[in-house]
Image (spheres, coloured by chain):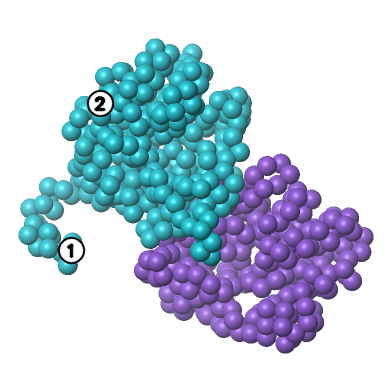
């Protein structure tokens, strides 16, 4: 596991790109170690963190890294859905951002030469992009509509499904999954809880191993607050230090 | 029994006889040194942010904690409904205590029981442990035998101290709850019945509704505790009220995010300051607050003469 340097680092935003409904910002983390796919960072804009809707955000926000470049640039994928993501989406080159990370446990390579298969939904495609950079795997990606489906370009050669049928397969990404499941596959998935639950149930039924990158509200990211627990077969675990990637077999249900 | 060897810091600061390198510690339950070492490695030990480490509340039996969601963000703070998950006394002694004993600072163990007998068992278990410098009593909990929150009533607090004081020579710190009529009355009772110090404030009771407007509480535990800068003014007033009623050393806390806030708590009468929620935003917050506080104290004489007090008074609300 790649450990985080102890303490936050103030890093410059060096680029902002719009990808349909999503914003990608690049942060130059010259001092930090290279993250493993599925690890995450706690992000805080250095200016005006607070003062948005409800006078928030207050806490940092946890984001899996989308991609790392050789020069230490880290890309993050945002969708503006609340006061924290709104402020992060506003960041442009020259703005400052506090980084804490890389944190948590990321994806583990498939065992016994199994073939990796990536399944992503919405903004949850982020950790699959950096994982695809490492292991080169086919991807099934689901989005709400065409504006969101522009995010599919962040991965190589994905099969795309949209809820409204505007791009690719008309339906849920998990409807594409059964056709791809066979006993030689390991599934890596990240997306909204209903999608992850469908992936978990399908993989369980087919006896296919799956690693799920989950999300939970998180105050600290390093095990201090105990706020981000999810129920597993062994009781509650802190997603920040025991995840965010969990084996599907550890879960009864993704809720 | 081997007492923990703590090198005497140069500044000569002590708290209940415990030498400390600086006056900033952590609030119980806001920093997990074992998890932080997993995340940051031994760099945590090299730059440990607190002058003493207060561990998360230990109960007699293991607790899973409350169902999620456990957090709700507020303007200038948050509500938590964590529910005191812990491995229980036996699990703490076997798994946590040996790891916490490796920290480079004195260890204060926070304990909570649902009856005086339970608290007594916990205090007794730690009372002679060499790894433990002091005990903090979390009294924000109902006594199941009387139905009263132990720390919300001076009589309950007195009876609790009568039960546990004879069990240890280690310093006993009573963590006062703000959710009562008079924390100062409770502090006075604690002092009269043998407490060595008080710490305050614990979180203020709060709740939030689900944003869907369905009339259900957001937090899995129903209600929770409010912390962060939003509570700081309340905490300052309570520290000042407690200081007016007791000579005991005070650990002041509630929304401390920088050295200026820590200096305010000391003006209110605190001997030490604890950093809580701010550590969630910045794991080195304790060290930063300590450094800023030291600078403020070093410059106080010079700054005071150079400033125009009337102008500063206007500036805050300008």
Q: Residue at x 75, y 85 (%)?
A: A165
User: Which chain hosts label 1?
Assistant: B
Inspect this view and state whether residue A215 appears. Answer: yes
Is residue A153 among what the camera can see?
no
Q: Which chain is cyan?
A: B
Residue with the mark numbered 1: B317
Spatial separation of the CA atoms under disc 2 and disc 1: 35 Å
Q: In which quarter of the view is residue B317 placed?
A: bottom left
Check disc 1 and report its element: helix, strand or loop: helix
| Left or right: B11 as drawn, with respect to A76 | left
Q: Is residue B28 left or right of residue A133?
A: left
| Point 31% across, 26% down: residue | B154
What residue is shown at x 41% (from left), y 58% (from top)? B74
Chain A visual colour: purple
Residue under pointer 2: B188
Residue B205 falls in which quadrant of the image? top left
Q: Give the x, y percent position of residue B265.
A: 25, 43
Classify mark 1: residues with Cα within 10 Å, few (<14), some (14-19) or many (20+).
Answer: few
Give percent across and percent down for residue A23: 56, 78
**Is B255 situated above or below A195?**
above
- Mark 2 and mark 1 lie on one chain; the one further toward the N terminus is 2
Q: Is residue B214 above or below residue A246?
A: below
**Is residue A128 rendered to the left or right of residue A103?**
right
Q: Which of B86 and A30 lies nearest the eye of the viewer? A: B86
Residue furthest to the right? A183
Q: Residue at x 56, y 38 (%)?
A: B85
Left or right: B240 in relation to B38: left
């Amino acid at each position: 596991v790649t450990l985080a340097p102890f303490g936050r680092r103030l890093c410059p935003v060096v680029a902002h790109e719009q990808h349909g409904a999503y914003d990608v910002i690049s942060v130059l983390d010259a001092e930090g170690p290279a993250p493993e796919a599925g690890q995450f960072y706690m992000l805080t804009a250095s200016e005006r963190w607070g003062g948005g809707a409800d006078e928030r955000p207050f806490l940092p926000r946890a984001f899996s890294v989308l991609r790392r470049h050789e020069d230490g640039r880290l890309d993050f994928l945002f969708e503006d859905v609340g006061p924290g993501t709104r402020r992060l989406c506003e960041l442009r080159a020259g703005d400052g951002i506090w980084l804490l990370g890389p944190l948590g446990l990321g994806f583990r390579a498939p065992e016994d030469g199994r073939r990796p298969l990536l399944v992503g939904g919405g903004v949850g495609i982020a950790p699959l992009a950096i994982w695809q950079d490492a292991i080169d795997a086919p991807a099934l990606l689901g989005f709400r509509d065409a504006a969101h489906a522009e995010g599919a370009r962040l991965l190589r050669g994905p099969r795309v499904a949209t809820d409204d049928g505007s791009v690719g397969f008309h339906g849920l990404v998990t409807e594409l999954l059964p056709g791809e499941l066979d006993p030689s596959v390991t599934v890596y998935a990240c997306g909204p809880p209903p999608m992850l639950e469908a992936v978990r149930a399908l993989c369980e039924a087919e006896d296919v191993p799956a690693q799920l990158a989950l999300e939970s509200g998180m105050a600290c990211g390093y095990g201090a607050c105990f706020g981000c627990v999810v129920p597993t077969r062994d009781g509650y675990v802190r997603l920040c230090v025991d995840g965010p990637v969990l084996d599907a077999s550890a879960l009864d249900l993704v809720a | 029994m081997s007492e923990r060897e703590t090198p005497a810091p140069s500044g000569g600061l002590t708290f209940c006889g415990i030498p400390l390198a600086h006056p900033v510690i952590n609030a119980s339950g806001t920093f997990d040194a074992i998890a932080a070492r997993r995340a940051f490695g031994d760099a945590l030990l090299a730059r440990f942010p607190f002058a003493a480490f207060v561990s998360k509340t230990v109960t007699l039996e293991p607790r899973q904690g409350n169902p999620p969601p456990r957090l709700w963000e507020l303007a200038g703070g948050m509500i938590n409904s964590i529910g005191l998950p812990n491995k229980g006394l036996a699990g703490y002694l076997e798994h946590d205590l040996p790891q916490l004993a490796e920290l480079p600072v004195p260890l204060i163990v926070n304990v909570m029981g649902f009856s005086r007998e339970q608290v007594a068992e916990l205090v007794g278990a730690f009372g002679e442990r060499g790894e433990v410098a002091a005990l903090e009593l979390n009294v924000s909990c109902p006594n199941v035998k009387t139905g009263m929150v132990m720390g919300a009533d001076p009589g309950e607090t007195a009876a609790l101290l009568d039960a546990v004081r004879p069990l240890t020579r280690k310093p006993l710190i009573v963590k006062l709850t703000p959710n009562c009529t008079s924390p100062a009355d409770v502090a006075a009772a604690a002092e009269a019945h043998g407490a060595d110090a008080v710490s305050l404030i614990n979180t203020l009771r709060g709740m939030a509704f689900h944003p869907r407007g369905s009339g259900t509480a957001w937090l899995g535990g129903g209600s929770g505790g409010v912390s962060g800068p939003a509570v700081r003014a309340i905490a300052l007033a309570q520290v000042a009220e407690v200081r007016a009623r007791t000579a005991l050393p005070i650990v002041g806390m509630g929304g401390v995010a920088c050295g200026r806030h820590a200096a305010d708590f000391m003006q209110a009468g605190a001997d030490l300051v604890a950093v809580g929620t701010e550590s969630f935003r910045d794991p080195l917050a304790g060290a930063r607050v300590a450094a800023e506080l030291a600078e403020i104290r070093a410059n106080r004489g010079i700054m005071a003469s150079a400033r125009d007090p009337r102008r500063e008074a206007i500036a805050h609300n300008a």
